[in-house]
Image (cartoon, grey):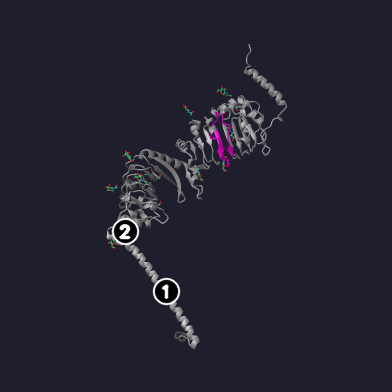
Amino acid sequence: MAMLPDREFLNIVWLVLVLVNGTCQSERRIYPDLSTTTSVSHSAFINVNGINNSSGDSWNKAATRQLSQQRACHCCRNGCDLQMGNLTCHQVSHFTREYLADCSASIVSLNIVEGRFKTMEESGLLHGHYPALRKLSIRNSHLERADDWPAPKQLIELDFSNNSRLDFIAWNVFKQAVELEILILANNKLDRIPDVISMMNNSRLSTLELSGNEWNCQGNFQWVLTLHERGVLLNGDNLTCHDAGHKESWIDLSYSIIKRENNKKTVAAECRSRTSGCYCEFVSAGIGGRGSYTVQVDCSNRQMTSLPAELPNFTNELDVSGNNLTSLDQVIKYRNPPLKVLIADSNRIESIRNLSGSDFLRNFSRFSLRHNLITPSEIPLDDIVQVPSEFQVKYIYLYNNSWECDCNTATKVRDWLWKYHHVVNDSSHILCSRDGRKIPVLHLLPNQVCDDPNYLRNATSEAEMNERNISILHSIIYVEAAAIAVLGFKLAYDSWHYFRHGQLPWIATKLL
Ligand SMILES: *[C@@H]1O[C@H](CO)[C@@H](O)[C@H](O)[C@H]1NC(C)=O
Ligand SMILES: *[C@@H]1O[C@H](CO)[C@@H](O)[C@H](O)[C@H]1NC(C)=O
Ligand SMILES: *[C@@H]1O[C@H](CO)[C@@H](O)[C@H](O)[C@H]1NC(C)=O
Ligand SMILES: *[C@@H]1O[C@H](CO)[C@@H](O)[C@H](O)[C@H]1NC(C)=O
Ligand SMILES: *[C@@H]1O[C@H](CO)[C@@H](O)[C@H](O)[C@H]1NC(C)=O
Ligand SMILES: *[C@@H]1O[C@H](CO)[C@@H](O)[C@H](O)[C@H]1NC(C)=O
Ligand SMILES: *[C@@H]1O[C@H](CO)[C@@H](O)[C@H](O)[C@H]1NC(C)=O
Ligand SMILES: *[C@@H]1O[C@H](CO)[C@@H](O)[C@H](O)[C@H]1NC(C)=O
Ligand SMILES: *[C@@H]1O[C@H](CO)[C@@H](O)[C@H](O)[C@H]1NC(C)=O
Ligand SMILES: *[C@@H]1O[C@H](CO)[C@@H](O)[C@H](O)[C@H]1NC(C)=O
Ligand SMILES: *[C@@H]1O[C@H](CO)[C@@H](O)[C@H](O)[C@H]1NC(C)=O
Ligand SMILES: *[C@@H]1O[C@H](CO)[C@@H](O)[C@H](O)[C@H]1NC(C)=O
């Protein structure tokens, strides 16, 4: 009966091979390229008998299991040290295929300190096969990209830290590392990280350290907050992100990721409970050199007939265009903070008089009311154009509010538009209708619409005043010209008189 060779037989074959091989020593074998290192450490064969299974954690079990299978892996010369499956290398720049073929299978813990390779490809590590690897650590190294890395299923600890140039890690490799318990990525140059927890589909992680990187705030760090709440995150207070949206600004805006994610979470909950189905976007923006949070709430086109009673905290921008609103009075109650931007186009608003005197009206930066039904008399014209400080800008949009071309429009409103055209941003597009015609309000003439002689007089009086001013100016110019002419004439006469009679003018004799 043809039987497969059993284990005993294999071991004997292997032993013979080792004996044969062992005699011709290791000149043929190429060990990690350690030509640049100086430290010397000769650790010889691993003593399988020396293993003691007193402490029973998974680590030691793995090590023990592995070592009992271990072949005589000649390791390592300068800079590397292999003890009980624990391979530690200083300043290594390359692992050869031959070395890894011999040894990689027995490595339980791989520690590389001050590695000289820039990529995983360069390190040669990917040529190895690591069925026993439990811990992988690459620290204080020149590593710049980890496009791929050895991640056997049973990896428990991954430590890539203090690699000041490391800006890329192949995150999808985490899908294989389903047993990971410790993940240390501190002090690198990483800017993005996906939700590795859901990638690994595990909740075993007991230690996570991410601080000292260049995380971009645009990323989603809600999972980090979840881990922080579970007590898994190390150094959470020092975990910051940078606002890449403001990269051009010279102020470096950094935010505490935990605080920011906490606020985000609160806002998301408030968005659900306070607005019915609006979309709330959390943004951080640098105001006055400090990181601050703002929320933009988009409630457009939702058939709303009234404004939400309350908005999420930090809301400073609200878009309610395309609804059936008739009043904006609720805006006065949004105090925390008051709105800076309110877009209420295409509603059925008839009046904003009630907003008069409110913080919102004083302090908004953009207020858009196009396509509504607000006549000029329902707008607090004086309040709405007040700018609280010279550094602030205000824009109002009033296009298409079905204005009639009446005398008030032609006089008071027209003057107001002329005066505040820098505030009423669409002033030149604002029309009023008269006999079915649309006329730009800025060019509406009082005598076209004002029958009341009182209006006419007042409206024309301004023009008259202007004309009068101009004629006064002209008069002054005439008088001055005449005076110059008289002076010239007198000078000519005096000169003629002097040459003719040798006599100075009377005033000159007095002066001499
Ligand atoms: C095993 O551990 C015990 C107690 O920790 C110790 O006394 C003993 O010497 C160890 N055996 C070996 C072979 O190291
Ligand atoms: C190690 O533990 C196993 C059981 O887990 C036991 O059978 C064996 O005797 C132990 N070896 C030593 C040296 O203590
Ligand atoms: C492996 O070796 C390094 C350096 O010799 C040591 O710091 C580390 O604690 C060891 N790890 C284990 C699991 O034995
Ligand atoms: C990282 O570097 C800092 C200072 O450069 C040092 O204090 C720290 O111990 C290092 N951490 C590791 C894990 O090497
Ligand atoms: C995640 O794990 C659960 C059980 O732990 C399993 O039911 C589910 O299918 C896994 N999901 C993925 C995407 O692997
Ligand atoms: C956070 O960083 C500051 C300085 O950057 C340091 O003084 C402080 O000790 C750090 N906190 C923790 C918990 O590491
Ligand atoms: C909004 O958030 C700020 C800062 O966290 C807090 O002080 C304030 O009480 C919050 N306001 C409301 C209405 O929740
Ligand atoms: C809102 O107005 C549209 C027409 O503009 C109308 O069809 C709709 O029924 C109104 N919805 C409510 C809730 O009033
Ligand atoms: C303005 O406020 C008064 C009193 O609260 C209210 O009766 C009126 O309907 C409001 N006007 C508008 C247009 O909302
Ligand atoms: C108006 O806005 C400025 C800055 O945007 C703010 O400092 C000020 O407190 C606001 N005033 C009111 C009354 O809300
Ligand atoms: C003006 O607004 C009304 C609704 O108030 C809208 O039906 C109409 O299309 C708008 N006209 C223009 C020119 O935008
Ligand atoms: C016109 O001017 C007179 C006084 O100059 C003033 O009493 C009156 O209110 C003005 N009328 C209008 C419509 O402005």
The residue closer to the viewer here, 181 or 268, is: 268
CA distance for labels 2 and 1: 38 Å
Under mark 1, the amino acid is Glu
The residue lying at 40 percent from left, 74 percent from top is 479
Return the residue at label 1: 480
At mark 1, the secondary structure is: helix
Residue 339 location in percent, x, y? 38, 47
Determine if the magenta segment contains residue 350: no
At mark 2, the secondary structure is: helix
Instruction: From this view, report whether residue 89 is shown above or below residue 317.
Output: above
The residue lying at 67 percent from left, 20 percent from top is 13
Q: Do callouts 2 and 1 mark residues in contact (Cβ within 8 Å)?
A: no
State whether the magenta stretch is mostly helix, strand or loop. loop
Under mark 2, the amino acid is Asn
Evaluate whether residue 411 shows in this view. Answer: no
Which is nearer the N-term, disc 2 or disc 1? 2
Determine if the magenta segment contains residue 152: yes
| Badge 1: residue crowd in 10 Å (few <14, some 14–19, many ≥20) | few
Q: Quadrant of residue 176?
A: top right
Evaluate whether residue 437 shows in this view. Answer: yes
Q: Quadrant of residue 4?
A: top right
Return the residue at label 2: 447
- Say whether residue 70 is left or right of residue 466: right
| Badge 2: residue crowd in 10 Å (few <14, some 14–19, many ≥20) | some
In this picture, which residue range is highlighted in magenta?
Answer: 144-171
The residue closer to the viewer here, 452 or 188, is: 452
- Say whether residue 324 is left or right of residue 19: left
The residue closer to the viewer here, 83 or 512, is: 512
- Say whether residue 391 is left or right of residue 456: right
User: In this view, which residue lies farthest toward the top?
Assistant: 1
Residue 239 location in percent, x, y? 49, 42
Residue 122 location in percent, x, y? 63, 36
